[in-house]
Image (cartoon, helix red, strand yellow):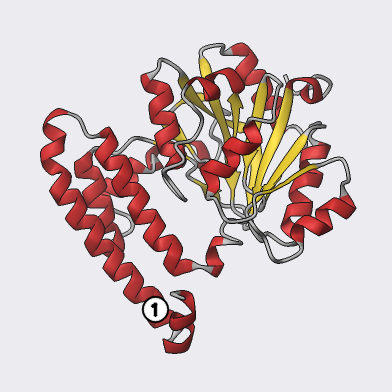
Amino acid sequence: MREHSSVGSRCAAVVVNREAGGALLDCVASLRSAGISEIVVVDNSSADGSLERLAGADPAAVLVPTGRNLGYGRAANIGAQRIALDYVLICNPDLVVAPDAVATLVSRLDAQPDCAIVGPRLDNPDGSRYPSARAFPSLGDAAGHALVGLVVPDNRWSRRYRMEEYFDEQSAPGAAAAEAAEVDWVSGACFLARRSGFSSVGGFDEGYFMYAEDVDLCWRLRRAGWRVLYDQAAVVVHAQGLSTSRHPVRMLVAHHRSTWRFARRSARGSERALLPLVAAALAARLVVSLARELTRRGPSRAENATS
């Protein structure tokens, strides 16, 4: 199931970079070790020299400078348009894929022709597991997660959204290795897409600058009749937030704006009556989150963060 021999002829990778530093080199090196020969790096106007360092370390990588920060989804679309192979691995630059991870994902899509996307298991650098497969939240769950999650992270709404019972079962001592599970959506930090499926819905919605573009993509794919899978046998270690942590205020605003965009798009029927509640919950959550961030950073750093 995990032979590397066909990976290079079936699968290419798109890495969206934004000031990831040396992590970008580690990411690309791990993709090479996983058997990927065609790698497109779309750079959102990095000023840290990471693109230049990669050009020296891996001259075969295709470098696509955008000239400005276009956001994750738009940059990923630009890279995917350069790919002609069956499958495209789209990923952040701050991760390292296990040597057999891509071959495992390729085999999964080969065996499931009605599947458009399969996401790997994402581990944090400390070995803990990140809940990278999740459920589409109802608007009630979204409001509960947004408000209650600020003060009580381990609440029923957040646990349901994060599929924590599923991950608890998979992480339990002695748990048997599970087959790939069908899920609502997987993290855009790293996933393998069937290019035909990805293209059939127009790729990422470029109206999202950051965050929720992965939820939206999987939602549109599922509505179009495609399936989305999560395969814990494919392991990726993700450092998370190397570039976004440099601009926390902007990222908080982008996160909440994207969540609201998806809520308005996905609400159906009677759920639309709950949209004012969701808007109020998101606004309250954003105010509290910004206050916490600005207090943590201090007056001078907060001024720089908003500039």
User: SS for tag 1?
Assistant: helix
Name the residue beneath numbered marker 1: 294
Q: Position of residue 290 (x, y in %)?
A: 35, 71
Residue under the point 40% across and 74% down: 293
Q: Is residue 80 above or below residue 278?
A: above
Residue under the point 27% across and 41% down: 263
Q: Is residue 191 above or below residue 70?
A: above
Q: Is residue 234 visible?
A: no
Q: What amino acid type should be assigned to the residue bearing mark 1?
A: Leu
Q: Position of residue 240 (x, y in %)?
A: 58, 56
Residue under the point 50% across and 36% down: 170
Determine crowd level at label 1: few under 14, some 14-19, many 20+ residues with C-alpha closer than 10 A: some
Q: Quadrant of residue 47?
A: bottom right
Q: Position of residue 73 (x, y in %)?
A: 52, 42
State left or right for residue 267 relative to residue 71.
left
Q: Position of residue 74 (x, y in %)?
A: 54, 42
Quadrant of the snapshot with the N terminus: top right
Residue under the point 40% across and 43% down: 164
